[in-house]
Image (cartoon, grey):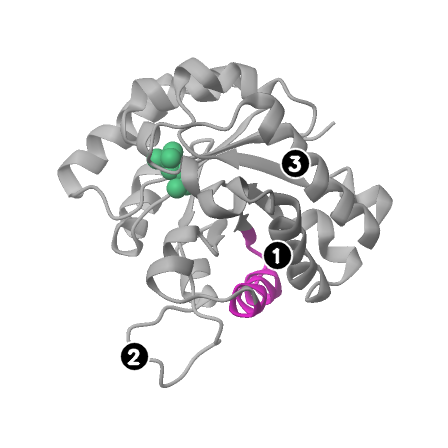
């Protein structure tokens, strides 16, 4: 049985005061459950998460990381730095990073290796654009993304990775993949994982992301290969985020 994971992706939102209220609201409403819950926040607020959340069941992490371990990389941040602040998760290859910062599949795969090397959990995003979906290339696009990732990983490490399927056309748009559409792609991802190792593929969590909200989460999370959510907009409101956690 895969343990569900609901992870908030705050993107570039928040400030010290609003974060304090949001984190307190989530903490207060979290009930003991088998669902893993986390927030990935702007890097400067990671210490705030550490001081607010240590000892709670709410985990925290970053939204990106350098592929390098240390050195002359101005503006970058290493995985070992995240580990200093007890981060557990790093989102990688989000479509916004791919689109606005030119991140390639190859770079995302390198970052994944680095995150695994330092013992954190990579949440690696894959997904097709609207044009790709409309031209029926979803399977080809997602399969190609998965193949590059899988070529970069030892089979034994497979279960340490979390994949997030995020159709680009559903992110922040209010358009959600139907549960059946999402399940179809999740099954493709699982089949790709199974090529690497059939048994461990069953242990990999595959999250759905893209306008997941309290009113569609339950149906999405009921699908056999949807093991949680990567939640953007709805993660900025504690009641909405908790409602999604509840569904999981
Ligand atoms: P959204 O974002 O929930 O606001 O669509 C999801 C994401 O980008 O991870």
Q: Residue at x 55, y 64 (%)?
A: 105
Marks 1 and 2, how far apart in space? 28 Å
Say if residue 209 shows up in the picture: yes
Q: Earlier in the sequence, mark 1 or mark 2?
A: 2
The residue under label 3 is: 186
* Residue sitting farthest toward the right: 198
Please tell me whether mark 3 sits on a helix, a strand or a loop: helix
Q: Quadrant of the N terminus?
A: top right
Q: Residue at x 33, y 33 (%)?
A: 173
- Foreground: 32 or 210? 210
The residue under label 1 is: 145
Horizontally, residue 58 falls left or right of residue 132, namely left
- Magenta region: which residues? 106-122
Q: Is residue 220 above or below residue 70?
A: above
Q: Earlier in the sequence, mark 3 or mark 2?
A: 2
Q: Is residue 33 above or below residue 110?
A: above
The residue under label 2 is: 74
Packing grade of label 2 (10 A; few <14, some 14-19, many >=20) is few
Packing grade of label 3 (10 A; few <14, some 14-19, many >=20) is many
Marks 1 and 3, how far apart in space? 13 Å
- Foreground: 138 or 37? 138
Horizontally, residue 188 falls left or right of residue 137, namely right
Question: Main structural element of the magenta stretch: helix, strand or loop?
Answer: helix
Q: Earlier in the sequence, mark 1 or mark 3?
A: 1
Say if residue 3 shows up in the picture: no
């Amino acid at each position: 049985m895969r343990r569900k994971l609901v992870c908030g992706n705050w993107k570039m939102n928040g400030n010290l005061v609003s974060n304090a209220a949001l984190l307190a609201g989530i903490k207060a409403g979290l009930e003991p459950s088998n669902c893993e819950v986390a927030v990935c926040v702007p890097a400067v607020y990671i210490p705030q998460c550490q001081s607010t959340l240590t000892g709670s069941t709410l985990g925290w992490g970053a939204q990106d990381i350098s592929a390098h371990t240390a050195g002359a990389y101005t503006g970058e941040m290493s995985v070992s730095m995240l580990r200093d602040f007890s981060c557990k998760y790093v989102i990688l290859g989000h479509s916004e990073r791919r689109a606005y910062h030119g991140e390639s599949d190859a770079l995302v795969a390198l970052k994944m290796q680095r995150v695994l090397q330092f013992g954190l959990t990579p949440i690696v995003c894959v997904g097709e654009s609207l044009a790709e979906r409309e031209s029926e290339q979803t399977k080809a696009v997602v399969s190609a993304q998965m193949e590059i990732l899988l070529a970069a990983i030892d089979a034994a490490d497979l279960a340490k990775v979390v994949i997030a399927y995020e159709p680009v056309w559903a992110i922040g748009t209010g358009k959600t993949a139907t549960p059946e559409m999402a399940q179809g792609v999740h099954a493709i991802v699982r089949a790709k994982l199974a090529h690497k190792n059939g048994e461990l593929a069953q242990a990999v969590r595959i999250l759905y992301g893209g306008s997941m909200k309290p009113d569609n989460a339950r149906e999405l999370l009921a699908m056999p290969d949807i093991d949680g959510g990567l939640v953007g907009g709805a993660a900025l409101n504690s009641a909405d985020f908790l409602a999604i956690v509840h569904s999981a």
